[in-house]
């Protein structure tokens, strides 16, 4: 199976968002990763539903929405309305993670759980079988263009063996500092889906950059 790639819209040129989505539609990208930040859970604000809704209308690839917000439960319906197929919430932002995951699934979306760099993978021991995807953050969330944290590779290996032990088919997604070099190491460690912002959207040829990651 070729590596799955989810380019992160955060690094797109917002003066021509329609053109950027056209590029995604015509590329071999598997999904489009959409980062929603609230300035509370992370020290930055990205965009909200007034952007996500029209993106969902014109994007032909499944939307992979990454909520970096407190109280994500309050926005599950809005994400569904924006036609999100994958919805990822942060472990650190959910007091009742089991309930949140069930709510996401009850709306017909796939549920992902993201872990910050300082959160160990074993906190998911009792919920892993309910997760469609785990997102390992390989930078501290909030900004694009940061340096890859190498310890993420150890977390992925550990998570992969937890998944194999349980025989579940949870996907491992990685987000932050992904390029051809780190991407190769991530795939070798067991990652299934690579999120890439700057590496794709700042490339001279973004469609080629996507193909490069898919070949890893
Ligand atoms: C960061 C976001 C990422 C970001 C990655 O908090 O979750 O999706 O766009 O950007 P790069 O690929 O540039 O590190
Ligand atoms: Zn993200």
Image (cartoon, rainbow, N blue to C red):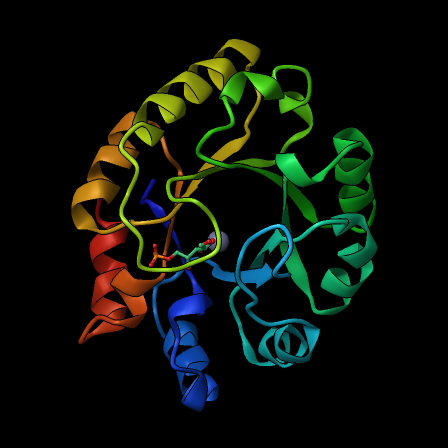
Give coordinates of residue 176: x percent, y percent.
36, 48
Quadrant the C terminus occupies? top left
Residue sitting at the far bottom: 15
Label total for image: 0
Query: Where is residue 191, by image quadrant?
Result: top left
Residue 198 % position (x, y): 30, 64
158 in relation to 190, above or below:
above
* Residue 197 image point, x, y percent: 36, 61
Q: Quadrant of the N terminus?
A: top left
Q: Quadrant of residue 94?
A: top right
Task: Please state which of residues 110 and 146 is positioned toward the viewer in this rendering.
Answer: 146
Position of 198 relative to 123 (above/below): below
> Which residue is drawn at the image coordinates 62% and 53% (left, top)?
67
| Foreground of the two, 40 or 8 | 40
Coordinates of residue 152 in the picture (x, y in percent): 35, 31
Side of 167 where 2 appears, left or right: left
Residue under the image location 46 percent in, 29 percent down: 118
Residue plotted at (78% across, 55% down): 76
Nearer to the camera, 78 or 190:
78
Up/down of 50 relative to 16, above or below: above
Q: Residue at x 18, y 49 (%)?
A: 180
């Amino acid at each position: 199976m070729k590596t799955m790639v989810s380019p992160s819209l955060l690094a797109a040129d917002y003066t021509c968002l329609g053109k950027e989505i056209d590029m995604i539609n015509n590329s071999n990208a598997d999904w489009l990763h959409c980062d929603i930040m609230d300035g509370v859970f992370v020290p930055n604000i990205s965009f909200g539903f007034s952007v996500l809704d029209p993106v969902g209308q014109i994007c032909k690839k499944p939307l992979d929405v990454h909520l970096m917000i407190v109280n994500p439960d309050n926005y599950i319906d809005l994400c569904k309305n924006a036609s999100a197929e994958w919805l990822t919430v942060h472990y650190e932002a959910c007091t009742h993670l089991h309930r949140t995951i069930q709510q996401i699934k009850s709306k017909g979306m796939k549920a992902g759980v993201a872990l910050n760099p300082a959160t160990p993978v074993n906190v998911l021991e009792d919920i892993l079988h309910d997760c469609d995807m785990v997102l390992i953050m390989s930078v501290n969330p909030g900004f694009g263009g940061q340096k890859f944290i190498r310890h993420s590779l150890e977390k992925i290996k550990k998570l992969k063996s937890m998944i194999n032990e349980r025989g579940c088919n949870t996907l491992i997604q990685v987000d932050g500092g992904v390029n051809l070099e780190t991407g190769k190491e991530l795939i070798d460690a067991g990652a299934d889906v690579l999120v890439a912002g700057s590496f794709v959207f700042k490339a001279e040829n973004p469609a080629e950059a996507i193909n490069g990651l898919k070949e890893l």
